[in-house]
Image: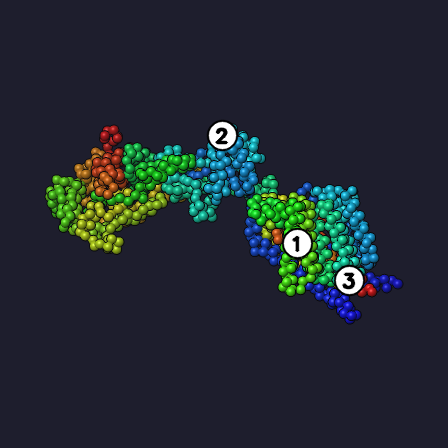
């Protein structure tokens, strides 16, 4: 009996994805060190350090709970999960605490809990469960209605907090999971087109709002974007224009179905309205940040300042860095949000290019292992979950680091495992727990 | 149908196809990471140095302490240039954006009566400057007001500066030179040596030559500041080293007399007095002068007036003016003839008052003529006809050679920048540049220092020194010592002018004796009588240079006493007429002044006073 137990333990230890586990541990430890470094100059050094360490411990507990429980449990209860997460998000409007204008936290006394982070994991589980179930019917659009509905509900609820940056991650996850599940390419393209157009319109609207000298073209678009009636006329005009083009293409005997025409128009209208909604939700500081990304010279001491200082911090680290706890940009307060959004800039400053490369390689190894989990999972549910989580990590990484180096607009997404934030870290470890669980059970049929 | 549908399923959900999609996705992610790595490489490796400097600039603030410029003394320790403290209001544009700049300007208009429009114009005009000097000599009330409104005045700084002051105003202006704000070109050239925008830099005179010593090393504190500008700690503290002080060879009393004679009397011209045994310049005047304080006080109207003045007050005639030497040049012709044995001292030429050569008639200054005249009387009375004939006998080439031997066409490298070379014409030059042959008439002109020949007053002063030293010329110089003056420590001499021989002519003793005799008698009984002082043997040669601009220039060049000469001088009065009339009396006054100072040293001279001899 004892022998078999030991055998099982060794078997488990052998199957356990140590690389994935250690990569995430290492990233978290680096994160904690740099949170310590970032807060050295503030009066509350221990405060952030211990809170993050506590969250780390809590995360590990949740991780092990998830490792040792069968992940298939979630597949059976996706609607329950959906209801629970909606309940969590709705509850915020009654019990939530406002932090920096966003009603996104539950005050648990010793801990501020941000359900949005957890909901992201739930969202991936729900999508994976649904996609696996409907895998054979994904060619038909009506079977995709439910995922869209889930996404829509989440985004609306999160935007209502309002939390613009958190809402961004849902559509990329949806897009990638659809892709992995084998949804038709035309549909993916439509979705991508919609996303792209929405973002472009939002940026364009931001740009218009701060432009001082406007020519005819800009004035016209401002009217369209900001006056409902003009907007409606504009959309009608586009409709007629497209109709004429459609008719013209038909005359050329080009095989074009009426459905495509309507889908295209629908996407246009959809992105037009969603961009309008987004423009309303975006806070003025976020609008300024977006603008600063479009044109850093617009306000070099205001919104553009953060990104500029972040670039200076990163660049000034040179190859070997200024040494741990010696980053002048961070210590003297030039680098903003250095323990959260801009922690990567701090690492780059103090550890140089070698350090930032090391962190990026760790992330890459982590994501490689996550995709490996997707590859080796025994069922498609596991694969889809892994794919979704990979997207969650990659998206956060790319947007956060892209922002730090100045090639992405500053949105304020955290860097997984590294940025300060308890809920964020715990939910990341929940994700790791799920992945390890999927990986551990890859041979169980 | 069944096959078809299963194929469709396989197409999308088959393991193989899922793997393929996963692989594409993996490549996509790899691509994203690659972009990030490339961008990090760009920022940290390629542009790392730049960003490092930016971050250092972020955290370091340098507070430069004003460093007093070195003091300039005359040879007796009298102060010619020093400094005085001034409070200056600065506007630093470096960390201002449009909004804060506007705020500052508004406040300045409201509280300090500046015109916003004018300030804006100045900022646009002086764009390359990061720091604008708004106002100097801030009153106490204004200082208090400034401190009260400091928060509303980003970019405004008040600093105590030590400003150059020339307590004697116009005194020795050309010798001292003047300071002005550093210009773009100088800044580019001198930035590495620590010059910064807004610095004052020597523009002429010894302020320019010795700027490096006078200005000292910048000092100050490097302070680490955080993002809010709070000072964290002092990174380094380097004390400014005071500018080195200069002790000049200048004799203020002599200089004062010289200036009186020219500047105060409204005469344009030059007086140079030097010590032949040492090369020390005792007085150097270029008239008209100017007040170097005007540049420091920033009086644009006055400065503009100086720059546009047709009498060229900023032009240092002593080293930059080039004039015909006139009869002074006869010394050269005489020495050439004596040295080359072209003349017997007893040989007489006949001077009828004019002399015809081909189609040209040349005149002697003495219209009546000197009659039969030999070498010494010709030199004493400066007979032109004699020297025409002497020049023709010697030939132009010989005279040219001797003029060049005496350095009349070179610079003496006195420690004033901008010294010009004189010009000695010759056959080769005329052929090359004027495309004309050398005529005998040219030789005639050259032999009495007219025609193409041009010299600087300094070159003639050097000539006088050579004659006084019997062939030797010591490096003429103005700065005697460079002294480091500390607040605690004793002044330390860090450099002292050495007496360097820059010319040594091999000329026979006999020639020197004849020249001394001739020049001595020229003062005693000849053209230079106006300079004579009873009991003192003075050598001198007058010159009256014809020139195309108007009345003749007057020259008087000489040294005294003839045995063991103490001073040599060149006096030049622009459009002064005859040298014996307008220049020679100045020499007399200078020598008397010198004697009065040095009475003890020259015992052979009976006690003299200026009054008595007048």
In this picture, is B254 found above or below A52? above
In this picture, is B135 found above or below B392? above
Could one spot residue B395 in this view of the protein? no
Could one spot residue B552 in this view of the protein? yes
SS state under label 3: helix
**Same-subunit check for callouts 1 and 3:** yes
SS state under label 1: helix
Q: Is residue B369 left or right of residue A422?
A: left
Percent position (x, y) of residue A191?
70, 57
Q: Which mark is residue A137?
A: 3
Q: Which residue is mark 1?
A: A239
- Of A218 and B211, nearer the camera is A218
SS state under label 2: loop
Q: Which residue is mark 2?
A: B139
Mark 2 touches mark 1? (CB < 8 Å) = no
Look at 28% across and 43% down and name the residue there: B457
Work out how far the residue at label 2 is from the one at label 3, CA to CA, in angstroms.
87 Å
Which quadrant of the rendered structure holds the N terminus of chain B? bottom right
Look at 76% across and 56% down and name the residue there: A145
- Of A352 and B121, nearer the camera is B121
In this picture, is B234 found above or below A121? above
Which quadrant of the rendered structure holds the C terminus of chain B? top left
Subunit of mark 1? A
**Same-subunit check for callouts 2 and 3:** no
Look at 72% across and 61% down and name the residue there: A179
Percent position (x, y) of residue B471?
26, 47
Q: Tell me which corner region of the image, top left, top right, bottom left or bottom right, holds residue A106.
A: top right
Name the residue at the right extreme.
Answer: A1
Q: Residues within 10 Å of mark 2 (few under 14, many from 20)?
A: few
């Amino acid at each position: 009996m004892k022998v078999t137990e030991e055998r099982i333990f060794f078997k488990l230890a052998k199957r356990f994805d140590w690389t994935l586990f250690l990569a995430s541990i290492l990233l978290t430890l680096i994160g904690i060190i740099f949170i310590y470094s970032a807060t050295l100059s503030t009066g509350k050094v221990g405060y952030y350090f211990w809170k993050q360490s506590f969250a780390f411990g809590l995360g590990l507990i949740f991780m092990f709970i998830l490792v040792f429980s069968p992940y298939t449990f979630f597949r059976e209860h996706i609607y329950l999960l959906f209801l629970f997460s909606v309940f969590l998000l709705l509850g915020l409007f009654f019990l939530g605490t406002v932090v920096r204008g966003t009603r996104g936290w539950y005050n648990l006394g010793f801990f501020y809990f941000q359900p949005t982070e957890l909901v992201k994991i739930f969202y991936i589980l729900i999508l994976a469960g649904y996609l696996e179930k409907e895998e054979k019917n994904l060619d038909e659009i009506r079977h995709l209605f439910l995922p869209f509905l889930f996404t829509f509900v989440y985004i609306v609820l999160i935007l209502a907090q309002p939390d613009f940056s958190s809402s961004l991650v849902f559509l990329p996850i949806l897009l990638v999971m659809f892709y992995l599940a084998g949804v038709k390419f035309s549909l993916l393209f439509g979705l991508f087109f919609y996303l792209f157009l929405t973002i472009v319109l939002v940026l364009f609207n931001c740009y218009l709002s701060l432009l001082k000298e406007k020519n005819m073209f800009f004035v016209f678009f401002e009217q369209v974007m900001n006056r409902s009636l003009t907007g409606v006329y504009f959309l009608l005009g586009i409709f007629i224009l497209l109709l004429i083009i459609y008719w013209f293409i038909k005359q050329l005997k080009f095989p074009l179905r009426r459905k495509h025409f309507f889908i295209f128009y629908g996407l246009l209208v959809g992105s037009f309205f969603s961009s309008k909604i987004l423009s309303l939700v975006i806070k003025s500081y976020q609008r300024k940040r977006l603008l600063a990304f479009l044109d850093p010279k617009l306000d070099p001491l205001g919104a553009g300042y953060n990104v500029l200082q972040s670039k200076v911090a990163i660049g000034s680290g040179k190859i070997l860095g200024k040494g741990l706890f010696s980053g002048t940009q961070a210590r003297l307060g030039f680098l903003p949000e250095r323990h959260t959004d801009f922690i990567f800039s701090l690492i780059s400053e103090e550890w140089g290019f070698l350090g930032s490369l090391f962190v990026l390689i760790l992330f890459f190894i982590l994501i490689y292992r996550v995709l490996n989990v997707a590859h080796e999972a025994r069922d498609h549910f596991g694969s889809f979950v892994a794919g979704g989580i990979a997207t969650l990590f990659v998206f956060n990484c790319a947007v956060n680091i892209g922002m730090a180096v100045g090639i992405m607009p500053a949105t304020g997404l955290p860097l997984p495992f590294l940025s300060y934030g308890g809920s964020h870290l715990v939910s990341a470890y929940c994700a790791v727990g799920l992945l390890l669980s999927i990986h551990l059970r890859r041979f169980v049929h | 149908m069944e096959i078809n549908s299963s194929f469709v399923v396989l197409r999308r959900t088959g393991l193989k196809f899922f793997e393929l999609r996963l692989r594409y996705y993996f490549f996509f992610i790899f691509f994203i990471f690659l972009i990030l790595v490339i961008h990090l490489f760009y920022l940290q490796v390629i542009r790392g140095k730049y960003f490092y400097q930016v971050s250092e600039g972020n955290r370091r603030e340098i507070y430069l302490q004003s460093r007093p410029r070195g003091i300039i003394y005359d040879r007796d320790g009298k102060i010619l240039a020093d400094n005085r403290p001034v409070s200056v209001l600065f506007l630093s544009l470096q960390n201002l954006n449009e909004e804060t700049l506007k705020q500052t300007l508004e406040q300045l208009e409201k509280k300090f009566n500046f015109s916003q429009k004018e300030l804006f114009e100045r900022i646009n005009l002086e764009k390359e400057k990061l720091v604008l000097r708004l106002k100097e000599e801030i009153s106490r009330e204004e200082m208090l007001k400034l401190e009260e409104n400091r928060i509303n005045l980003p970019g405004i700084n008040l600093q105590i500066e030590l400003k150059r002051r020339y307590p004697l105003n116009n005194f020795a202006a050309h010798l001292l030179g003047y300071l002005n704000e550093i210009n773009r070109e100088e800044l580019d050239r001198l930035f590495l040596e620590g010059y910064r925008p807004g610095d004052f830099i020597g523009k002429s005179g010894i302020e320019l030559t010795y700027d490096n010593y006078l200005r000292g090393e910048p000092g100050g504190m490097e302070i680490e500041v955080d993002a809010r500008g709070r000072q964290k700690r002092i990174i380094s503290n380097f004390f400014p080293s005071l500018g080195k002080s200069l002790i000049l060879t200048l004799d203020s009393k002599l200089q004062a007399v010289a200036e009186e004679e020219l500047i105060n009397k409204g005469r344009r011209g030059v007086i140079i007095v030097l010590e032949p045994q040492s090369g020390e310049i005792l007085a150097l005047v270029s008239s008209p002068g100017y007040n170097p304080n005007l540049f420091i006080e920033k009086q644009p109207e006055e400065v503009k007036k100086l720059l546009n003045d047709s009498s060229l007050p900023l032009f240092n005639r002593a080293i930059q003016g080039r004039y015909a030497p006139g009869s002074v040049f006869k010394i050269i012709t005489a020495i050439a003839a004596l040295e080359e044995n072209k003349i017997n001292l007893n040989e007489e030429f006949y001077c009828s008052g004019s002399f015809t050569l081909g189609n040209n008639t040349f005149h002697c200054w003495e219209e009546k003529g000197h009659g039969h005249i030999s070498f010494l009387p010709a030199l004493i009375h400066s007979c032109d006809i004699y020297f025409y004939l002497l020049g023709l006998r010697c030939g132009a080439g010989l005279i040219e050679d001797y003029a060049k031997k005496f350095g009349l066409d070179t610079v003496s490298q006195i420690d004033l920048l901008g010294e010009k070379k004189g010009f000695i014409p010759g056959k080769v030059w005329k052929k090359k540049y004027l495309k004309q042959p050398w005529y005998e008439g040219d030789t005639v002109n050259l032999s009495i220092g007219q025609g193409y020949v041009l010299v600087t007053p300094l070159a003639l002063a050097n000539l006088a020194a050579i004659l006084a030293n019997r062939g030797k010329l010591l490096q003429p110089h103005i700065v005697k010592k460079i002294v480091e003056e500390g607040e605690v420590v004793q002044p330390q001499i860090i450099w002292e002018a050495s007496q360097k021989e820059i010319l040594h002519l091999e000329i026979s003793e006999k020639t020197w004796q004849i020249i001394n005799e001739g020049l001595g008698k020229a003062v005693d009984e000849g053209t230079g009588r106006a300079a004579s002082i009873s009991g003192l043997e003075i050598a001198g040669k007058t010159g009256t240079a014809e020139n195309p601009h108007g009345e003749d220039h007057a020259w008087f060049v000489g040294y005294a006493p003839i045995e063991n000469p103490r001073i040599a001088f060149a006096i030049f009065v622009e459009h002064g007429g005859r040298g014996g009339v307008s220049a020679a009396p100045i020499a007399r006054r200078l020598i008397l002044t010198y004697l009065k100072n040095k009475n003890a040293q020259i015992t052979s001279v009976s006690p003299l006073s200026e009054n008595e001899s007048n």
